[in-house]
Amino acid sequence: MKRIFKYTFVGLLAGCMLMTTSCSEERLITTPTQSMSGEGLLASGNAALVALNGIYREMYTAGWSTTGNTHQCFGITAYNLASEVMGEDFIMGAQGSGWFWFDCVYDVKDMYTRTTWRNYDLWNAYYKWISNANYIIAAEETMSGTSEEVNYAIGQAYAIRAYSYFMLAQWFARTLVGHENEPCVPIYTEPTTPDTKGNPRSTNAEVYAQIDSDIENALSRLEGITPKDKSHMGYAVAQGIKARVSLVENKWAAARDAAKAAIEASGCSIADVKDFIGLNNVGAKNVMWGAGIIADQVGMYASFYSHMDLESGISYANTAPKLMNKELFAKMEPTDTRRSWVKQGFTYKDQDGVASTGLLQEKFKFTDVPTWLGDYVFMRVEEMYLTAAEAECRLGNEAAAKEDLMALMAKRNPDYVCDDLTGTALGRTSAVEDETGSLLEEIINQRRIELWGEAGRMYDLKRLKQGFRRTTQQGWCESALLANRPTDNPENYMWVMTIPQTEFDGNVNLDANKDQNPLGDI
């Protein structure tokens, strides 16, 4: 089946333009088929914000990136949640309605021929954001407005493109370091049309070079400009993205510097746990980037909190409770305020019908259940402190690493100390029996706790080249242990997604027999 996707921008809604799609039976190009400039959307820097707001709206809206399984396909939080359940720390107690369960048990790669599963959803979403970013970037020379207005629009487009390629690389290729010359994803930097034949897969090194170039272009244009909204990728958020990318690239000094710059530019500060209960308010002082959800934008069942907030009474959370790894919880001292993020002694029947007791998540809550309200948080300043700490540790600056770590932990546990820790050793897996007791391991463990449910655990496991193990002692049910899968092998292909068949159908420079990712684990 060959498809072509057409983009249409319709009606202004609460400051955001909703981007919708329609498809006709032709060939797949994951890009728009008409110039947005022709619609006047890119005539000026301010006008381009309409198009940008359309992209940002898609970052939390369900039902546009795929027409099937939409209740698990609602943008950034959905993709990060899928990455979370693929690891060891974020436990799905049962399958429930099925949403995210197939990610959890690694049973989606063979669904690449369908347009209703994770493979297609990820590919389609990120490439559509890239496509529209390309149109905005291409309009720079003809865009009217002040230099600040134009730079604000173009800088965000570069940041969106960098972010999208970064996420595609994490899902559709092995990690960069050690796999620089392996195939990653096709690169598009110019507007495309139905006549575009498609590009071949670029290497990891080429894709990350593009990401680096895009993020530097974003930073050069966004510096000194105050973001108009928390949903926008301003200078601080672009630095935060650079920090994330630099960790994957093992560019430790760059990661440290970007994280520090993000902290300073954001104006955000570490918040006490009691000050961001529910993690559902983009107005909190620690939130750098997120989506403020208003009443007519809620996803209802197709939303992050419907899957998370069991006390809301919504069936998705009730029938598929989300739990914390008991061994991870045990790493928090009794005085750690983050212990409030779980309900101890929660009883339920697991996927195998076994009566179980676990640690029910209490970290993510609706702000108002009857109206389905709750903002989406995409980046917190606490992440930047942990990034800086990891980078300083890897650079051998242990005093600075401990200072960054303590800046966070002073707000989490008054009894916390890390004075005696040293070194950068990590175990082959994250399992308790493989622990090294190093300073780096402690920083990573605090990252696992602090960003639990938010950051996408599989992204970290891939870049750290660290395997994992699931056990019943951690709280996993037997049917989700992945006992016969090579989870302890960080070089495996389990967590490298297959490319959707529709891309091969529409791209003459890709051959499914040669360019598809391995269907197997190794």
Image (cartoon, grey):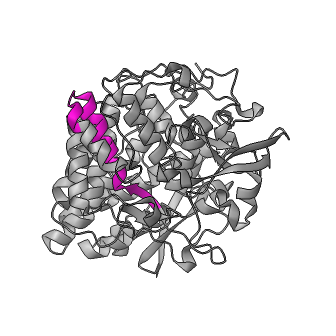
Q: State the image quarter where residue 193 is shown.
A: bottom left
Quarter of the C terminus within the rendering = top right
Q: Relative to 500, is 492 above or below?
A: above
Asked whether residue 28 is in view, the answer is no
Give the image location of residue 430, x and y in percent. Answer: 51, 27
The front one of 86 and 221 is 86
Q: Quadrant of residue 66?
A: bottom right
Q: Main secondary structure of the magenta part?
A: helix
Which quadrant, please, contains the N terminus? top right
Give the residue drawn at x 28%, y 53%: 238
Is 329 placed above or below 239 here?
above
Residue 270: x and y in percent read 33, 57
Is 391 inside the magenta-drawn segment? yes
Q: In front here: 375 or 163?
A: 375
Residue 360 position in % (x across, y down): 66, 51
The residue that appears at 22% across and 62% down in the rendered structure is 140
170 vs 417, left or right, is right
Name which quarter of the figure residue 340 lies in.
Answer: bottom right
- In the rendered image of this protein, does residue 157 appear above or below residue 118? below
From this viewpoint, is residue 111 visible?
yes
Q: Return the residue nearer the eye: 434 or 209.
A: 434
Instruction: Give, as a single range, the part of the protein colored magenta.
Output: 377-400
Along the horizontal axis of the image, is 120 left or right of 55? Answer: right
Q: Residue at x 31, y 45 (%)?
A: 406
Q: How many dots with numbers? A: 0
Asked if residue 287 is among those painted magenta in the image, a careful observer would answer no
Toward the right, the furthest residue is: 353
Query: Residue 273 location in percent, x, y?
Result: 45, 59
